[in-house]
Amino acid sequence: MAQDLSYVDSVLDRFEGKKGTLITILQQVQSHQGFLEKEALVKVAKSMGISTARIYGIVTFYAQFRLTPVGKHLIRVCHGTACHVQNADGLTEALSQELKVKNGETTPDNLFTLDSVACLGCCSLAPVIMVGEKVYGTLSTDRVRKVIKDYKKKEKAQ
Ligand code: FES
């Protein structure tokens, strides 16, 4: 069965004929399912008249792009300066222990992906993580463990 790439078409249609929009197009394509699938990249490359190799060069250069699927809950741990000095490394370590995955990995049940990112834009709440679109600030390692335990509990209850 042919893959449904209509979401890529609708993004490309929106930007047709506009210059300097490749990164925005890739961001919007990625927002559909949290990562960039190969077929979507091939389609974007064709439509923009650039090679697939070039587009891979671009998406692997920028940390914001993912080439593999993410879990149901994407956990982004901020490692920007304000969060770094407030023990962001400790939060990543605590989450890594709690979820039994390394940074950048997804749990085998596909529920959680752990990711380090640059400033999330709410430095006054440092250290900060986001789970999906929800922000958790002024965290300690104990509190961050609790946040994830609550998510796990909710998942079990479903
Ligand atoms: S440095 Fe973490 S939110 Fe800005």
Image: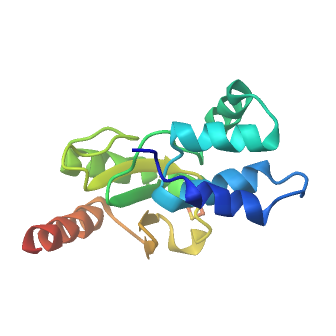
In the figure, 56 relative to 14: above or below? above
Residue lying at the far front of the rendered structure: 1
In the figure, 88 relative to 51: above or below? below
Q: Quadrant of ligand 1?
A: bottom right
Residue displayed at 83% across by 58% down: 16
Tell me where residue 120 appears, x and y as whole percent: 58, 63
Q: Is residue 109 left or right of residue 31?
A: left
**Front residue (pair 24, 124):** 24
Which quadrant is the N terminus positioned in?
top left
Q: Is residue 49 left or right of residue 123?
A: right
Q: Is residue 122 left or right of residue 21?
A: left
**Front residue (pair 124, 8):** 8
Q: Is residue 140 left or right of residue 21?
A: left
Which quadrant is the C terminus positioned in?
bottom left
Tell me where residue 58 appears, x and y as whole percent: 71, 35
Residue displayed at 45% across by 57% down: 76
Among the 4 quarters of the image, the one containing residue 61: top right
Residue displayed at 52% across by 61% down: 32
Tell me where residue 50 appears, x and y as whole percent: 79, 33
In the figure, 157 relative to 80: above or below? below
Coloured how?
A: rainbow
